[in-house]
Structures are given as structure tokens and as C-alpha cells.
Amino acid sequence: MTGFLRPAETPAGRRAWLSGLCESIPKAGSKNDLLDRIDSALLASAPAGDTATLESLGRTYRDQIGKAADVHDRAAKVSSTGLPEVWVGETGVLAAAAVDAAAREATRMAEAFTGGARALLTLADALGHAQRQDTDGRSRMEHAKRQLGGRDGFFDRMVDTDEEDREVAAARTVATAGIDLMHKAAVAADDAVRAAARDLNKWAAEARAGKMRTDDLTAVDRLMLADTSGPAGEADYNEILTANDLERSGRAMEKLSPADRARMEHLLANASSPQEKAYLMKALAAGHDVDDIEAFGGKIHGKDPAWLQQHLSPITTQGDSLDDEGTNADGSNVNTDLQSFGSQQWAQGGDGREGTCVASSTVTARAMVDPVYALSLTGGPGGQENDPAAFRRRLVDEQHRVHEEGDGGDGWNGMGLDGKTEVVNKEISPETGSSYELHEVRDAGSRRNVLPDIEKAVAEGKPVPIGVEGYDDKGNRSGHAMMIVGQEGDMLEIYNPWGRTTWVSEDDFVNGGMARASDDQLPDAYAVHLPQD
């Protein structure tokens, strides 16, 4: 074989390699040219994976579903029999609430086992089908190769008879059918692996209580903290502590000095609600020391859960936010959630009009992962304010500070990718514990390749900055920065610093459908910043 490199040995690499051959094999003009392309196709390895092992693992997961359901039933029975109003534990949780949390955790376990089993069994089925399809395609390629026989020498290529032309055409037809099957198999295997990785990462992140590994809190305390959500929105979409928060706060507790640990435990024990406890732990996860957390705790102590959510959680996701209600005339989703503090939205420039989208999405993302920072914006220096106008002034001032930090354009307009990388790492990385790395994704293949990393990050609670763009009929570019803040199945939740959130599909992200999160001037994702563990 001449003139061809070896294909990349990844599902995405094989997919791209075979896609190119799907175009070139039907156009092969000579016998040798066709033989070269057949040999090139056969260099690509078959879809890899042991379907029997995947099926065995899937059945093992499925066998655990009943056990988790039994735990739920027992916990629900205990809860209904009447319990004392106290529970011994560092944070003094109520017994009934603890048992209810155990029942909900058991339900999540059953859902995780169900989802994990389904992901593995679906992968096994898809992979088996792809392997059979690939085998069929390779058989056809080999048949076409036998039809062609040996390569033509120099003098053979000088004159082709009509019969030789017919033989090449017949072999080309067989090879075209073969490469089509091989490519379909590669696409199916690649898509199946990505879907399984997405779902398994999501279910792993949902195993929440086990993320907080510390002996300084009881198992009940850890369970309650993992279970706690704000009162507004869908509980499962609005848990206060993300998987990353739980892991980081547990590690931070273990590293505290005995004196600081005692102070932290005192704060938790005297908190007036599960939500207050959870925000104290979120502050610890964000990297604050106990002095800062004591000051923060004094500002939020005794506040009701609705006040806490309004002041400390910029994004609230409603239960019906995933409903597809169609699009507006400009291509944007009809179904969006406005994100506001009182009457003031979390919007760039306060009204969505300034060009500080990078800075504004970064400020909101930092407020999502750091409640101390969020309170400085919503509640002011004393942490007690409820004034939307004062919040707007502080929000815009902070957006301008970050815009200048990233060397943004004059007139609060635009910021380059280098500046964006700088501000994301200065403003968000310390709170999440992960540095951010720029990935340009200017075609469907590269966007598809980063999807598993995006979905893993947001499932763990790490926001992912995204850049979108579009060009008008005259070639004039429009650009915008947003933030991916959630994931559910094949859907991504997008915060747009125009002051709202909405959901787009994986297909929208890959194939130029990002207008749903903005408008039809901005259809294409071109850059993401991925957190590096």
C-alpha cells in the first residue's frame, strides 16, 4: 500500500478515518487506487470490547436493584412508626429527617444501579451489533480485493480494456458497500461508548453520600448534607453540595487543626437548618478558612431556607425546565428560567446589553461554587441586604473588575481567549480545585470528542465555560460566552449571561444548534475550557 498513514486507534479516530474513505472509495478511478483505499480501510481495527464481560457487569448491577429497594422500604417503614425529635450526632439532625434522607438515598441507589445496568447492557448490545456489522463490511472489502487481483505494473496501467474497467467498477461497488458498513459500525460503537461514559459518569456523581470521606462527621451527618436542596426548583437539580463539594469539604475537614475542627463542628452543630449546614460546608469546599466561615456563618445564621437559596445560589433549575416548548423566531428556546435576585437578573451589565459576557458568566459561575462570594454580591458587606438595585451595582462592578483582569476590550466590549483562560483560572479554579484548559472545537468532530469531559465535569459540579459564534451573509462575526452548568441524559444546561438558563441537546452542541441557548446569530460552539483534575 502507498500514500496512507495508519488510522488513529481510538473510536473517534477510526470513525473519522473511515468517513474519509466512504467519500474516496466510490471515486477511486484505477485498480491500484482502489486497492490502496481498501488496504487503508482494513488497517482500521474493529470495534473493541468484550460484550460478555459488559453483560455480566450489567447483570451484577441489576441484581443490586432489589437490595436497594429493600433498604428504601425498611427506612420508609421506620419513618412512619414515629421517631423521637432528637438524634445524637455532631450536627444534631432530627431523626425523622435522617431516616427520610436514608430512604431517598436508597431510592437514588436503586436508580443508579438501574441506570448503570441499562448503560452497560445497552453498550454490550450496541457493541455486539457494531462488531457484526464491521465483520460483514470487512468481508466485502476482502471480496472486492480478491476481485481485483494483483496490483497493475507500470505497463499494465498504460491501457485498460473495457473488461478491466468493468471488473474495477464491480469491485468498487462491493468495496463501497463494505466501507459503508465499516463506517456505520465505527459510528455506532463510538456513539455507544460515549453514551455509556456519559451515563456512568452521571451515576457515579450521583453516589453522593460516599463522596464526603471524613471521620469528623457521622454517617448520618454526611447523608443529610448530601441530601439537602434549596426549597425552590426541583430538588434533584438544586442540591446545595455538588459531588465535587462533598469530596473537597471532606478532605478539608480532615486537614483542619484540632482547634479549627472543633470550631467547624460547633458551627455545624448550632446551624438552624440542614440548608445552613450545607452552605457552611460548601464554603469549606470553596477553600475558605475557618475564620472566614465563622464570619460567613454569623451572617447567615437563623435565615430561612428560601432566604439562603436566594442569596447564596445564583442558579435555580425548575422541574419543567427540560420540557421542549419549541423555539422563538430567533431560534432561541421558548422554555427558559430567568435567574434573578429579586427583580434583578444575573445579567451582564445588569440588563444583558454590555459586551462583558466572559466576565459576567465567570462571576456567576464563581458565585455558584462559592457561597461566601455570592453573599458579598447579594447581601453586601454585612450580608443582610435584600435590595436588587444595590445588588445590580455590586454585580456590574464585579463584572467590570473581571473584564479588566482579562484585558477585555474598551467600552466593556469583548475579551480574547487568552484573557478568558486567565480569568477563569483566577476566579473559578481555586473554588473547584481544578485548573481550566482551553480547547478549540471548531468542527463537529472536535465538539463530539470533548462531550464526555464536559458532561463529567458538570455532573461533578464544575461549571464549563463555552464560546459560541456565528457569521452573517457578509462574513461579519458575532461571538458570545456562556457557561455549561448542568447535565441530564443527553441534555446540557446552559447559563447565558443575558440572565437566563435553558437546555440544549448533545446534537445541538455538536451540530450547530446553540442558537437555542442564545439566538440564531450564535449557532456554533467554537471553544470550551475544561477543568483538569
Image (tube, rainbow, N blue to C red):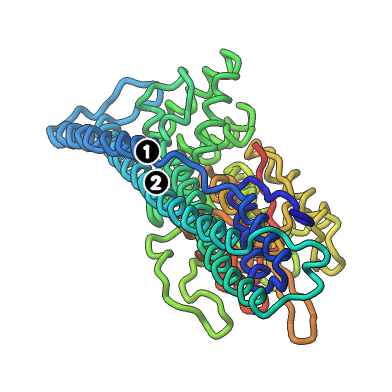
Q: Answer above or below: position of 205 versus 365.
A: above
Dot 1 and dot 2 residues touching (CB under 8 Å)? yes
- At which x and y percent is residue 223? 37, 31
- At which x and y percent is residue 368? 58, 49
Q: CA distance from mark 1 to mark 2?
A: 8 Å
Q: Nearer the viewer, residue 78 or 197?
A: 197
Q: Earlier in the sequence, mark 1 or mark 2?
A: 1
Q: Nearer the viewer, residue 31 or 511?
A: 31
Disc 1 crowd, CA 10 A, few/some/many (<14, 14-19, 20+)? few
In the picture, measured across the screen, residue 149 lies left or right of residue 334, that is right
In the picture, measured across the screen, residue 296 lies left or right of residue 437, that is left
Which residue shows up at 39% across the image and 21% down it?
218
Q: Which residue is mark 2?
A: 124
Residue type (three-letter) at the residue carrying disc 1: Ala
Secondary structure category for the residue under label 1: helix
Inspect this view and state whether residue 339 appears. Answer: no
The quadrant holding residue 330 is bottom right
Disc 2 crowd, CA 10 A, few/some/many (<14, 14-19, 20+)? many
Which residue shows up at 57% across the image and 68% down it?
176
Residue type (three-letter) at the residue carrying disc 2: Ala
Q: Which residue is mark 1?
A: 52
Q: Nearer the viewer, residue 272 or 62?
A: 62
In the picture, measured across the screen, residue 411 lies left or right of residue 78, that is right
Which residue shows up at 55% across the image and 85% down it?
329
Q: Answer above or below: position of 162 versus 232.
A: below
Question: Extreme left residue here?
Answer: 81
